[in-house]
Image: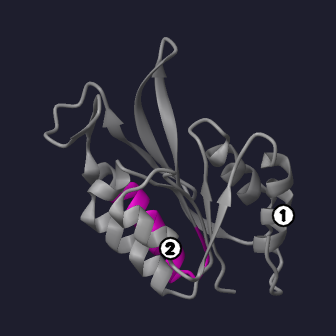
């Protein structure tokens, strides 16, 4: 199966929650990562990358002293590469479903991350990923690939998508959402 599904939508619409639900329902092995907010007294102060096979690292935080910055966050791209990129490449080598949450403006600052994303798209492994909704050159190039199914997530369709995606990736026969 060479299924490449990208989930997009407004911030807070449930893309990460949807990915977690789908992978929890799948019978087969998968790999990759998702990102999680870091909050301090209710305020978002950063993001960590969590590998599905275990391991996590903070890769964006307001208190970092790194030179790389996006908005109020300082970025530690080596943390993303050590945990996230490694998880993606391990899943690809194992011919598993690759999960990437998210292909976004922070993550694409890493050349190693962009390379890993391109490697997944050039491979035969299935992919379930979230992608930034707004326009950026790398992101637009990924969204416009002919082998991509782009799905807009909203509170109204989230529940239905969970079962459709679990069926799509959990069923080895061809099919789609």
In the image, residue 144 lies at what x, y percent?
50, 73
**Real-space Cα distance between discs 1 and 2?**
22 Å
Any magenta on residue 86? Answer: yes
Quarter of the figure that contains the N terminus: bottom right
Say whether disc 1 or disc 2 marks the residue closer to the N-terminus: 2
In this picture, residue 42 sits left or right of residue 174: left
Discs 1/2, front: 2
Residue identifier under label 1: 164
Local secondary structure at mark 1: helix
Quarter of the figure that contains the C terminus: bottom right
Q: Residue furthest left?
A: 67
In this picture, residue 104 sits left or right of residue 162: left
Residue identifier under label 2: 144
5, 35: nearer the viewer: 5
Name the dominant secondary structure of the magenta segment.
Answer: helix
In the image, residue 129 lies at what x, y percent?
57, 62
Count of picture labels: 2
In the image, residue 65 lies at what x, y percent?
16, 31
User: Residue 95, relative to residue 85: is it above or below?
Assistant: below
Residue at image x 67%, y 61%? 151
12, 99: nearer the viewer: 12
Residue at image x 27%, y 51%? 77
Circle number at residue 51: none
Local secondary structure at mark 2: loop
65, 135: nearer the viewer: 135
Residue range corresponding to the magenta coloring:
81-98
Q: Residues within 10 Å of mark 1 (few under 14, many from 20)?
A: some
- Residue 150 falls in image quadrant: bottom right
């Amino acid at each position: 199966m060479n299924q490449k599904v990208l989930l997009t939508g407004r911030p807070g619409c449930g893309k990460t929650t949807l990915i977690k639900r789908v992978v929890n329902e799948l019978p087969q092995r998968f790999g990759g990562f998702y990102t999680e907010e870091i909050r301090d007294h209710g305020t978002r102060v950063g993001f960590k990358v969590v590998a599905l096979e275990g391991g996590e690292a903070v890769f964006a935080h307001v208190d970092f002293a790194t030179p790389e910055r996006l908005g109020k966050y300082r970025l530690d791209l080596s943390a993303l590469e050590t945990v996230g990129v490694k998880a993606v490449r391990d899943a690809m080598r194992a011919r598993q479903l690759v999960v990437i949450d998210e292909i976004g403006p922070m993550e694409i600052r890493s050349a190693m991350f962009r390379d890993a994303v391109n490697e997944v798209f050039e491979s035969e492994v299935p992919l379930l990923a979230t992608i930034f909704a707004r326009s950026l050159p790398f992101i637009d190039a990924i969204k416009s690939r002919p082998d991509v199914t782009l799905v807009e997530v909203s509170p109204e369709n989230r529940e239905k998508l969970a079962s459709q995606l679990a069926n799509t990736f959990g069923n080895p026969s061809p099919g789609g959402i």
